[in-house]
């Protein structure tokens, strides 16, 4: 009994322990706005904004009316031009856009009047005003308080400016500003997305000032756009700017601002009632599901998540008498900032008033978001072409989220840290281990197993050692299987690491002379950048890495698979996308008549089935097409109840597509995240449960699918719960969509030409030596099993940063008992944990095979 309640506490603790920042960066947020994704053109150039919604203070002539102020459009006389010359002392001319509903606006674009060379008017500087209700207008200021924005320098180029902080508004005005008298004309565009939170304002007590080690930490809401007097009223600010604070509240994402910038904070000294009350007003009555509060939890500085929150709801004019209250479990262990999710239990309201109770001296929030109705933010990018201005400088293209400067800075730091670590590891390897045990190591690890491919290509491809040596051309075919993982929470970028291990490749050349490629290709990828990306383009990665010999078997011209009529599919949702293609979830009708007899479907009553359709964009290059065909051939060979099947293809016309199964319950990670172990928590929260025996049943099926793959010498390389799909009755099929999906990959960040890998699932030799074998799949299976038994409530090694994970890899290599293993999950019986540990054996040969794993799991069935 005692043990059980401890488990529940621990479990709860984990629920409120999200890796919020990391997930946030990865784009894994559907329920709150993500400024780096929310950058689609709102419809000036694309005409979704109607002429009648564009107005202006004045116009020079009919042909330069407001409606001609559309970016990239040459209609009328080529732009909006105000009536009078704009004098410095008279700067009240404006071009106004009504977006009809609240939008989150992250970027603006401006252009002058070119009119095919006749025009030469443009705004060198301008200001922006905005309004949510059409009556109160607010001047936009950047984070340093500056209002004026640098505009155009000629009449034709488009200039894009990030709005930092972003604007939440329905109406936006562009107001040209000049310091000498001249004619000005403008064409404009707004970029962003709809503001689904619907929040119009929040009223809160002023943020306070903290003295920490003689340093002043300003916890005021520095971008609040309402009235600031004794309290803040009628505005929005830092709590809705889409930017989450760092774990250490003194630091900030934004440079050149004061300590504490990211947070709004209060001390209990000023609140005798013990709580801070914040009132939220919304655009209309909404049906609220949750509120997420991003809180600091640096308890060492007396800052903690709120102890309790009580929320009152106002639907018409009256406040409802029944509040919702919620107490998160206090966390004195993990000092990271996190989102606390508060269920608002489907209350209908147009205003919400919440009292957040102090649990320590300080309480600090950086974001508060509301989820209502069923609205969800798009996490995918707008298609490349929509309104993307042609003349933008590379750093300015709004549809490439890569350009988000904050992300850039963060990623820059991350990469820098990784490099430093890499250097440290290299030195340590060199000094402590290498010289001493060179002999031993080279025998133990580098003999028959070590494929020569220690340069960057090696990590792209994996094959069984014996096949490697027999097929010298296989590096060629393998390079087309290069897979570029977008950087995200689950994938990390260690390729530099691999390249920076010259010692290893040196040895490999000496000992493994059967691998001539490594010397010529060391550090210099032999493929063009375009080739690297193409498989990522189609599906985010190829399906399975395949030994060369197997490829030979597949080299026949025919594709042994049924052609499908395209019209059978009904689009449901986009699962993922890459540069050269997309993966869609579709419904298909009457599939059975196309299917093999030996295949039974997960068919629902109305005879439609869910399928994943991977499509190659029509403009994909030849290499991408070839890879696509290869992938089809490989996939068509895989026939196992626990492996996703290729059902058909559409090859007769563009876009080429392949149709694979999809399962009704989505992937195992999401499936388990929605569920709870059987027990008190599930009873209390009424959450759906999965029993231990079903968990083990699922794990057994994964082992069975992997047993099949390994029997064909296929190496999966990305086994994880996110790549397992769940069907009826807990059936599992292994797939490989993981890295193409935004949910797991933060698709928007892509380091071209560099692999980004799922380091938390990877064996030490995969990370350090770039070696992928069935034994490294076994390692990943151990991690997958661990995820399954912890209900995917946290990432593996969530307490370690990516750098520390790589460091830990070095410990596995050194084997001085300093390596950290994943802990035994609470519901995991000892024999199963023993099995997990054996998957992480340092010596790959001592890890169990999938046959053994499958047998052990069956034997231990509860
Ligand atoms: C999401 O994308 C769809 C289709 O592109 C669009 O209709 C919808 O308005 C978008 N939603 C938001 C919140 O931007
Ligand atoms: C917040 O505090 C900083 C530092 O004292 C100050 O410069 C800034 O004006 C304050 N902002 C507001 C909105 O009060
Ligand atoms: C609010 O939404 C939930 C879930 O969608 C629904 O069950 C409930 O009936 C809605 N409440 C109202 C008052 O519409
Ligand atoms: C503020 O919180 C601290 C720590 O919980 C407590 O010791 C102190 O008495 C509180 N102060 C007030 C005024 O409530």
Image (spheres, rainbow, N blue to C red):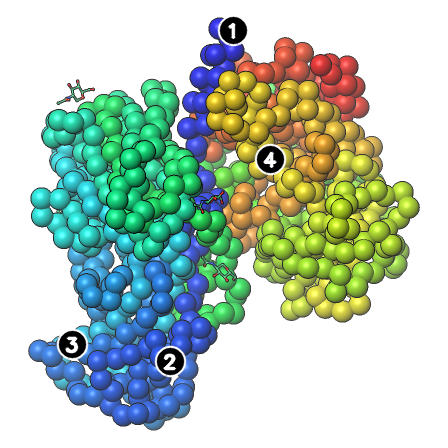
Give the alpha-carbon distance from disc 4 to disc 3, as whole Å. 55 Å
Q: Nearer the viewer, mark 4 or mark 3?
A: 4
How far, Cα to Cα, is label 1 from label 3? 73 Å
Nearest the viewer among 747 and 810 is 747
* Numbered disc in front, either 1 or 3: 1
Where is mark 2, residue-wise?
51
Indicate left or right for 443 with 322 as reference: right
Residue 563 is marked as none
Q: Which quarter shows the C terminus?
A: top right
**Is 543 on the left or on the right of 369, as rendered?**
right
Residue under the point 85% across and 43% down = 599
Label 4 sits on residue:
671
The residue that disc 3 covers is 92
Q: Which is more foreground, mark 4 or mark 1? A: 1
Judge by depth and name the residue closer to the eye, 408 or 577.
577
Badge 4 marks a residue whose secondary structure is helix
* Mark pair 4, 1: CA separation: 28 Å
| In the foreground, 768 or 576 | 576
Residue 61 seen in the figure: yes
User: Farthest residue toward the top?
Assistant: 2
């Amino acid at each position: 009994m005692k043990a059980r309640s401890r488990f529940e506490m621990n479990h709860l603790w984990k629920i409120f322990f999200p890796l919020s920042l990391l997930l946030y960066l990865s784009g894994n947020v559907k329920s709150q706005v993500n400024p780096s994704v929310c950058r689609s053109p709102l419809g000036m150039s694309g005409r979704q904004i109607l002429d009648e919604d564009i107005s202006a203070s004045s116009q020079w002539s009919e042909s330069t009316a407001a409606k001609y102020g559309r970016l990239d459009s040459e209609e009328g006389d080529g732009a909006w031009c105000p009536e009078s010359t704009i004098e410095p002392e008279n700067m009240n001319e404006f071009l106004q856009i009504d977006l009809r509903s609240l939008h989150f606006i992250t970027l603006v674009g401006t252009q002058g009047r070119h009119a095919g060379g006749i025009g030469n008017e443009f705004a060198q500087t301008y200001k922006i005003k905005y309004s949510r209700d059409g009556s109160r207008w607010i001047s936009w200021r950047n984070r340093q308080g500056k209002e004026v924005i640098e505009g155009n320098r000629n009449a034709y180029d488009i200039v894009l400016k990030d709005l930092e902080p972003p604007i939440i508004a329905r109406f936006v005005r562009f107001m040209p500003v000049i310091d000498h008298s001249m004619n000005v004309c403008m064409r404009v565009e707004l970029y962003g997305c709809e503001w689904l939170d619907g929040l119009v304002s929040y009223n809160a007590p002023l943020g306070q000032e903290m003295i920490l080690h003689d340093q002043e930490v300003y916890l005021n809401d520095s971008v609040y756009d309402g009235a600031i007097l004794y309290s803040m009223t009628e505005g929005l600010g830092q709590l809705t700017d889409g930017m989450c604070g760092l774990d250490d509240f003194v630091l900030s994402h934004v440079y050149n601002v004061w300590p504490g910038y990211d947070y709004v904070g209060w001390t209990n000294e000023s609140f005798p009632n013990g709580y801070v009350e914040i009132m939220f007003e919304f655009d209309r009555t909404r049906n609220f599901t949750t509120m997420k509060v991003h809180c600091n939890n640096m308890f060492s500085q007396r800052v903690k998540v709120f102890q309790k929150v009580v929320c009152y709801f106002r639907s018409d004019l009256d406040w409802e008498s029944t509040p919702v209250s919620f107490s998160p479990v206090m966390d004195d262990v993990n000092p990271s900032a996190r989102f606390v999710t508060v269920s608002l239990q489907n209350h209908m309201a147009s205003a919400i008033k919440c009292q957040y109770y102090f649990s320590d001296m300080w309480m600090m929030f950086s974001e508060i978001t509301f989820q209502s109705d069923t609205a969800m933010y798009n996490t995918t990018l707008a298609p490349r072409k929509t309104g993307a201005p042609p003349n933008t400088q590379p750093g300015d293209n709004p549809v490439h989220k890569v350009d988000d400067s904050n992300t850039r800075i963060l990623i820059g730091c991350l990469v820098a840290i990784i490099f430093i670590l890499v250097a440290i590891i290299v030195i340590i390897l060199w000094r402590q281990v290498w010289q001493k045990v060179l002999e031993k190591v080279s025998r133990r690890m580098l003999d028959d197993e070590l494929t020569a491919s220690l340069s960057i290509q090696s990590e792209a491809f994996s094959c069984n050692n014996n096949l490697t040596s027999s097929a010298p051309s296989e590096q060629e075919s393998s390079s087309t299987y290069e897979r570029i993982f977008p950087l995200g929470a689950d994938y990390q970028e260690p390729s530099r690491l691999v390249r920076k291990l010259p010692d290893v490749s040196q040895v490999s050349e000496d000992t493994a002379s059967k691998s001539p490629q490594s010397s010529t290709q060391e550090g210099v990828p032999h493929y063009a950048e375009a080739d690297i990306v193409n498989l990522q383009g189609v599906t985010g990665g190829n399906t399975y890495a395949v030994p060369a010999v197997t490829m030979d078997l597949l080299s026949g011209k025919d594709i042994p698979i049924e052609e499908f009529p395209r019209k059978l599919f009904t689009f449901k949702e986009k699962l993922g996308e890459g540069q050269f293609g997309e993966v869609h979830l579709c419904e298909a009708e009457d599939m059975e008549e196309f299917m093999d007899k030996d295949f039974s479907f997960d068919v629902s009553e109305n005879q439609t089935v869910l399928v994943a359709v991977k499509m190659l964009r029509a403009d994909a290059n030849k290499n991408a097409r070839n890879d696509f065909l290869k992938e089809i051939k490989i996939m068509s060979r895989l026939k196992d109840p626990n492996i996703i099947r290729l059902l058909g293809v559409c090859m007769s016309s563009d876009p080429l597509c392949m149709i694979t199964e999809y399962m009704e319950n989505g992937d195992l990670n999401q499936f388990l995240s929605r569920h709870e172990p059987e027990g008190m928590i599930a009873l209390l929260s009424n959450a759906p449960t999965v029993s231990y025996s079903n968990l083990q049943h699922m794990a057994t099926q994964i082992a069975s699918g992997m047993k099949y793959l390994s029997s064909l010498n296929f190496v999966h390389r990305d086994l994880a719960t996110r790549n397992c799909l769940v069907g009826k009755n807990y059936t599992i099929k292994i797939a490989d969509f993981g890295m193409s999906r935004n949910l797991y990959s933060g698709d928007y960040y892509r380091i071209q030409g560099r692999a980004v890998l799922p380091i938390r699932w990877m064996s030490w030799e995969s990370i350090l030596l770039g070696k992928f074998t069935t034994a490294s799949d076994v390692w990943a299976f151990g991690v997958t099993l661990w995820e399954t038994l912890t209900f995917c409530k946290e990432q593996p090694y969530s307490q370690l940063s990516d750098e520390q994970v790589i460091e830990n890899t070095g410990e596995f290599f050194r084997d001085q008992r300093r390596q950290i293993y994943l802990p035994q999950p609470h519901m995991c019986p000892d024999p199963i944990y023993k099995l997990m540990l054996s998957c992480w054996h340092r010596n790959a040969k001592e890890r169990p095979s999938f046959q053994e794993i499958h047998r052990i799991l069956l034997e231990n069935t509860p």
